[in-house]
Image: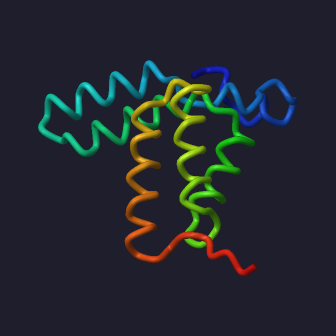
Amino acid sequence: MDALTIDAVLAGELSPADLQIHAETLRAQAAVAQQAGFAPLAENLLRAAELTAVPNEALLHMYTVLRPGRSTYAELQQLAETLDTQYAAPRNAAWVREAAEVYQQRGLLKRNLG
């Protein structure tokens, strides 16, 4: 923590990776939240821990794909499969699969205009 100074930033001695949280930290925070009775918070922290393995560019793409009206049901299912297999993120994959079902029920999927 002592290395995190304005001078270090201005000198180019720090990179974004120096400021990112680690999966282990998030899992430890999830355990504390679970023990304190905050199960939903614990689950969110565990999903966040999984996402530390996903490159930032992929995360930004996923954010766009998950916006209502941007993806078909099949595209959301493919995103879930990618999370599951490529990034070993089963909690996030399940969340995307659930979102795909909700989007389908509420008419929030991409409409084919052809």
- Relative to residue 65, is residue 84 depicted above or below? above
Q: Name the quadrant containing residue 37.
A: top left
Residue at screen point 19% across, 32% down: 34
Q: Residue at x 43, y 49 (%)?
A: 97
Q: Can you say whether 104 is above or below 36 in the image?
A: below
On screen, residue 57 versus residue 29, left or right, reads right
Q: Position of residue 58 (x, y in %)?
A: 70, 41
Vertical relation: 7 (above or below) 58: above
Q: Position of residue 75 (x, y in %)?
A: 62, 53
Please state, as top left, top right, bottom left or bottom right, where the C terminus lies in the image. Answer: bottom right
| Residue furthest to the bottom | 113
Observer-nearest of 104 and 15: 104
Residue visible at 18% across and 41% down in the picture: 38
Q: Position of residue 99 (x, y in %)?
A: 43, 57
Is residue 60 left or right of 22 when viewed as pictured? right
> In this rendering, would 36 be left or right of 55?
left
Task: Return the residue nearer the eye: 57 or 95.
Answer: 95
- Work out which quarter of the rendered image holds the N terminus and state it: top right
Residue at 69% x, 33% y is 55
User: Residue 32, percent across and down?
Assistant: 23, 28
- Left or right, 52 with respect to 34, comes to right
**Viewer-side residue, 112 vs 80:** 112
Q: Is residue 113 above or below residue 1?
A: below
